[in-house]
Amino acid sequence: MKTILLVGVIQGLFVLALLLIRSNKSATERILLFWLSLIVLHLGFSYLLRDGLVANPILAVLNSTVSFVQGPMLYLYFTSLYVGKIGRLKMSLHFLPAVLLLIFQFSGQTSPGLINAFYIYLMAAVPLYILWIFRCLWLISKNEGEQWKSIFNWTKIPLIGLGIIWLTFLVFEYLVRQDVVEVRSYFFISVTAFVYLMALHLYRNGASVQAIQNERTDPSVDNLEAAVKYRKSGLTASKAQVLHESMLTYMKEERPFLDSELSLNQLAAALQTRSNHLSQVINEVEQKSFNDFVNSYRIKAFVDMYNSSEDEKKSLLGLAYDCGFTSKSTFNRIFKKELGQSPTEYFQKA
C-alpha cells in the first residue's frame, strides 16, 4: 500500500504541474489546484505516517483534518464550475466544522466522544453534498441547452461513483469494523482517482467549460443553491415566454421606469402576475436583477431624451431625474456600467 500511496503522490504532482503551466487560470482551475494540493498532502502524510515511518502527532492531526474537507471542497468545486460566482461568507461556513475539529484536536481538551461526533458528521456530510449537487445539476440540465446536458451526463458518473465509494467506507468504518486501515487506504486512493479525472477533464476541456460558464452565469446568482430557487414556482416555459413579451410591451408603451419608486410588486401588479414569477422571468430570460433591468431602460430613455431635447439649458442631472434616477452618484455609476463611459465622456464623443 505504501507503493500505491507514493505513486498517488507522484501522479498528483504531475497533474498539478499540468494545471500550473496553464495561463489565464479560471477560478475553477485555481480551486481545483488547491483541492489537488490537499489531496497530494494527504497522500504524502499517509505515506510518512504508515507503518510508523514518521511518528508525529501534529502531522497525524493535520492529515486527518485534510481527509474531512473533501465534502466542502467538492461543493466549492462544483459551485465554481456550474455557477461561477461564490458567496465567500456562505462558503466559509461549510469549512467551519473541519476548522473546529482541527482546533479541538490541537487544544487537547476535547473528549473523545465529541471528536467522534465530529468525525461522524464530517464523514456523513460527503454523501449529503453529493446528493445535493446531483439534484441541483439535474434541475439545471432540465432547463439549459444541450451543452449543459452533456456535461451533466459526464459528471453524474463520477459523482455516483464517489458516493458509492464513500458510503462503502462508512459501512466498513462504523458498522462492519473489519480491516478498517485497508478500507481507508483504498478509499482515499479512490477519492484521489476521482479528483485526478476531474482535473484532467478540466485541463482538456477548459476552454469549452469556461465558455459555458460565461453563458450560464446569472448576475443575481451567487451560489449553487440559487440554481433551484424557482424550482417550485409553477411557471412553465410557455407562460414565462408570454409574461416576458407582455413585460417588454408594457415597459415600451407605458414607460413605468420613469417612476423613481417603481418596485417589483408594482410592476407585477400592473402585469397582473405574481412578483416571484416576474422576478423569475427577469432573472432567467433577461439575465439581470430587477434593478439592473429597470435601470437599463432608464439609461436608454436618458440618451434618447438628451439627443432629442431642444432645451439647451436642461442639465444632465435634470434629465436623469426625469428618467427615474434619484441621485447623481447612482446615475453616474449605472450609466458607466451600461455604456462603459461617464455621461460627459459619452456625449463628447457622440
Image (cartoon, grey):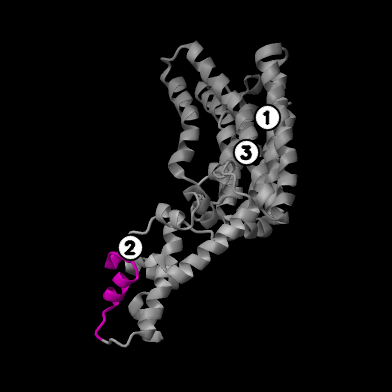
The quarter of the picture where residue 246 lies is: bottom right
> Disc 3 designates what residue?
133
Say whether disc 2 or disc 3 marks the residue closer to the N-terminus: 3
Q: Residue at x 68, y 33 (%)?
A: 191
What's the distance in space between the residues labelled 3 and 1, CA to CA? 21 Å
Q: Is 95 left or right of 202, judged from the image as shown?
A: left
Question: Which residue does the image show at 63% across and 60% down from the upper left?
Answer: 211
Q: Which residue is mark 2?
A: 260
Q: Is residue 325 magenta?
A: yes
Tell me residue 85's x, y (percent). 52, 50
Q: Whole-percent x and y of residue 52? A: 62, 19
Q: Position of residue 180 (x, y in %)?
A: 69, 16
Q: Amino acid at mark 3?
A: Ile
Could you tell me how many numbered marks the image carries? 3
Magenta residues, start to end: 313-329
Q: Which residue is at 70% across, 37% downward?
A: 159
Q: Position of residue 27 (x, y in %)?
A: 55, 52
Q: Marks 2 and 3, how far apart in space?
A: 40 Å
Label 3 sits on a secondary structure element that is helix
Image quadrant where residue 73 sits: top right
Could you tell me if the residues under marks 2 and 1 are in contact, i.e. CB atoms within 8 Å?
Answer: no
Answer with left or right where residue 104 lies relative to residue 309. Answer: right
Residue 21 seen by the camera: no
Q: CA distance from mark 2 to mark 1?
A: 58 Å
Q: Which residue is mark 1?
A: 188
